[in-house]
Image (cartoon, rainbow, N blue to C red):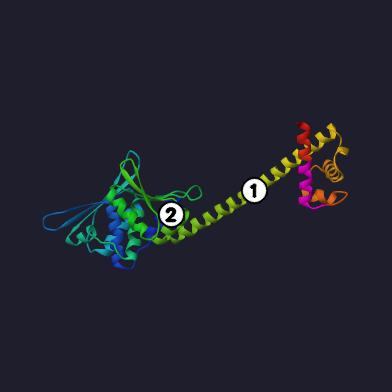
Amino acid sequence: MSFSGKIKEELAEHVAKARHCNLAELTAILHMCGEFEEDKNGICTIRFRSENYLVARKCFTLMSKTFNIEADIVVRKNMTNGSTSYFMRWAGEELLAVKNALVQAVCCKRAYIRGAFIAAGSMSDPSKSYHFEIVCGELAQAEYVRDMINSFDLDAKIVTRKKTFVVYLKEGSQIVDVLNIMEAHIALMELENVRILKEMRNSVNRKVNCETANINKTVSAAVRQMEDIVYVRDTVGLDYLPEGLRDVALTRLENPDATLKELGSLMADPVGKSGVNHRLRKISEIADKLRG
């Protein structure tokens, strides 16, 4: 099962204790997957359709807990692609509460976001990338969902995709927050484990890359030093160099792989790392003058 499917499976099992939260979640699902009709007598008819069994089951459960109304249910199998569609219909005056629900309390906002994700959301595999989205059919609906998510100090944005409007988050830390908001705690822990492993890998890679760069830099410097010393030796002889420079030149020729600190300790007249570096620079300047 995909990571997105695991989240929906977890959220489908979550049923709030408060009726107003169940109403908020139900409203979100029906805004995404339903149609509302109201006749002149104030009777509201709601039609629901989804190919996702979890969404249909959650919608039926919430409707049963929130309203004492029987549903007309139809299940159809598509013989072409093997998919199953679930259709449900309810009618009653009290259903206007679903159509006109005002979601204001923090707990109800959590429930609404949860319902919207169950009905029309998805999330990428966190081991590959961080991407959380809820697809809306209308811009006004997308703005409503975005603003509700952002009321929790997040930074959801909207992008147009074909004829739909997608509310999305791409920051790993913000996706962790939205999972917590929806109360998908198992998925949250799994995501955090993935993030920790990825961060450890990235940290190790950075360290290895840094060490590799330092090694390459050291090797390049040693090769250049050897070239300069050999050029001076073959051109004018090492006796051309002052005693201190000749000492470091001979030591480098004998120890081509040694670090500057090691060179300093191996010299006839030992010096520190900075002293070795200074003398090698002097030799490089002399070599450059001879080349010139």
From the image, tell me which residue sits under label 2.
6
User: Which residue is most to the left?
Assistant: 40
Q: Is residue 211 magenta?
A: no
Left or right position of 202 against 274: left
**Going 45% across and 57% down the picture, which residue do you hit?**
176
Count of marks overlaid on the render: 2
Q: Are discs 2 and 1 less than 8 Å apart at CB? A: no
Q: CA distance from mark 2 to mark 1?
A: 38 Å
Crowdedness of circle 2 by 10 Å Cα count: few (<14), some, many (20+)?
A: some
Vertical position of residue 280 compared to residue 289: above or below: below
Q: Amino acid at mark 1?
A: Cys
Residue 210, which numbered label?
A: 1
**Going 33% across and 56% down the picture, which residue do you hit?**
147
Residue 103, which numbered label?
A: none
Residue 19 visible? The answer is yes
Judged by its main secondary structure, the magenta piece is helix
Q: Quadrant of the C terminus?
A: top right
Where in the figure is residue 86, as x and y percent of width and height?
29, 50
- Element marked by disc 1: helix
Residue 1 visible? The answer is no
Crowdedness of circle 1 by 10 Å Cα count: few (<14), some, many (20+)?
A: few
- Element marked by disc 2: helix
Q: Amino acid at mark 2?
A: Lys
Where in the figure is residue 11, as x and y percent of width and height?
39, 58
